[in-house]
Image (spheres, rainbow, N blue to C red):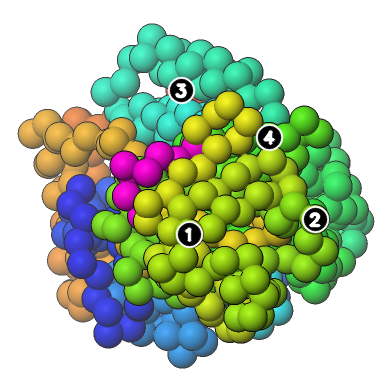
Amino acid sequence: MSRVEPDFSLVQVPVHLREFVVDQDYDKYTPVDHAVWRYVMRQNHHYLGTRAHSAYLEGLRLSGISVERIPNIREMNECLSKIGWGAVTIDGFIPAVAFFDFQAHQILPIACDIRQYDHIAYTPAPDIIHEAAGHAPIILDETYRMFLKRFGEIGSKALSSREDYELYEAIRYLSIVKEDPDSTEDVIRQAEEELERKAQAVHRVSEANELARLYWWTVEYGLIGDCENPRIYGAGLLSSVGESISCMKEDVKKIPFSLEACIATDYDITKPQPQLFVCKNFQELIDAVEEYAKRMAVTVGGTKSLIQASQMPQTTTSVYSSGLQVSGILSELVFDETGEAIYLKTSGPTALAVSDKELPGHGKEYHREGFGSPIGRLAGEAEPLELFSDEKLREYGISPGQRCTLAFASGVHVEGIVHYIQRERGKVVLIGFDPCTVTYRDQVLFQAEWGVFDMAVGERIVSVFAGAADREAFATGTHRPSAITAKMPSYSPELLRLHQLYQRVRQLREESQERDQVQHELAAIIGEVDASYQEDWLIRLEILELLRAEEGTESEQSRLVTSLEALMEKLPEQRQLIENGLRLLSE
């Protein structure tokens, strides 16, 4: 699946997220794919009209989503743009932080594949039914839109871990093999075992992990109202024919929503959920996200936050109290005897910024080998260095062209000739030395032959978050797209012929033709289906629907009903789906 430059006329995709965007390639959808969409949507439209949040049905229409065919993302964008949102197509699962980042920019990332016919009731893989018909309708509600955007803003800065990313890759791989019709039971079992191993390897629940849980129990599987008679707003329920019905049964626990309960409860994407959380209203969700943000590294900063960032082998940003933001892979921390971080180092391309704008001359090219700097006050000084006046700087010999020695309270020593002093927003943020030597006890942290030492100024780290400060200038996000991709489907001559039959049934339903001609063609199709596709129940439902609309003969209708009833006995796992289809046709 090719990555493309999106249409910027309606959706402005940030530079660092464009690598996740792929072409929808609308023509790849088969007539069977459209029939799968139509079955799910007709069922949900009928059932969820009384079970879903009040925004659902009108939200479908206003999102540019039709019951009859898979939505075209360009058409969806024309509709969503009226409420300030947009949509882009992505390739299956993407890292949670990236998914949240899209929502922070009021963009719905929509997996463009569609579930297999065999997985029509539920699929563990994200697909266009789940993403478009599940997520898009409820954003008609203004408070819910505010919640999604705020969740995205907070979630996109959540720190994760190496184990989180490996777990994500295992989940993505399992979702792909489960949706691959050529996957053997052995391949699926191995993927499940690998997922279990990766899940067991996660010993610390990170911010990103906790927020993923909160997202799962709200945006994906949330209920709203009261526990006795809740309504559905979670996309996972709105897009699952089976679970949207079963979730209302008594054996699925309905628990009053709470932030602590949600982030403490893990989930399994491969199974129906044993419990669901019921919020009173969407404002309760906004309040919960704001409460969670207060405890995040982006808010509290400090050594503990730096340690969390150092366990995440992706780009993070450490913010000094001066306002200087250091964006790169945090690779090393030096601690004093009390365990406080007194020096930080990044590896690889690093950028410096203030107020989320990259400082000229301090981008990834200049700091391509990394960056290092002390944290803290000067020894014996009550006033932080970033607040020094020009006069006080000169007292310490901090003046361009002058040699000086800075002794930090931590024990770090910086000695060299001042090359420059940079202030931003009234605070000293950088002091350059050339040449320079930096030491801590018997450890050399920077050597004179390495060139200019750009020393960050700040008595403490006030914030740490995932991703770069100036994400547009940095151009790459927290995570890269996965190298694991789904293979393109291949179709046998028999399947291609079946696609033609589905397409002809669709044409007969949509085109204006003489009733006798329609019934004659349907009779021929029924004959071929009975001869070659004995277990295909969906095309029989579509034909039966059309026959009833065209007042076809009772014998043909009875023949189809008999065939469908026989399939219910032969295919017990499909029984409920067939029953639901017949029930809808009789109402």
Are dots 3 and 1 in contact, CB under 8 Å? no
User: N-terminal of the two: label 3 or label 4?
Assistant: 4
Q: Which residue is mark 4?
A: 335
- Closest to the camera, between mark 4 and mark 2, is 2
Task: Name which residue lies at 30% across and 28% down.
Answer: 181
Disc 3 residue type (three-letter)? Lys
Residue 432, disc = none
Residue 15 in view here: yes
Q: Which residue is mark 1?
A: 403
Q: Are marks 1 and 2 in contact (CB under 8 Å)?
A: no
| Three-letter amino acid code at the position of disc 4 | Phe
State the extent of the magenta-drawn residues as a range. Answer: 445-452
- The part of the image, by quadrant, that contains residue 190 is top left
Few, some or many residues within 10 Å of mark 2 (<14, 14–19, 20+): few
Query: Which residue, given by chain and number where applicable, does mark 2 sit on?
Result: 380
Is residue 474 at least partly visible in the picture?
no
**In the rendered structure, which disc, 4 or 2, sits on the residue that comes first in sequence?**
4
Q: Nearer the viewer, mark 1 or mark 2?
A: 1
**Real-space CA distance between mark 4 and mark 2, rounded to the nearest whole angstrom:** 20 Å
Q: CA distance from mark 2 to mark 3?
A: 84 Å
Q: Position of residue 376 (x, y in %)?
A: 70, 53
Q: Residue under circle 3?
A: 570
Q: Amino acid at mark 1?
A: Arg
**Magenta residue check for 208:** no
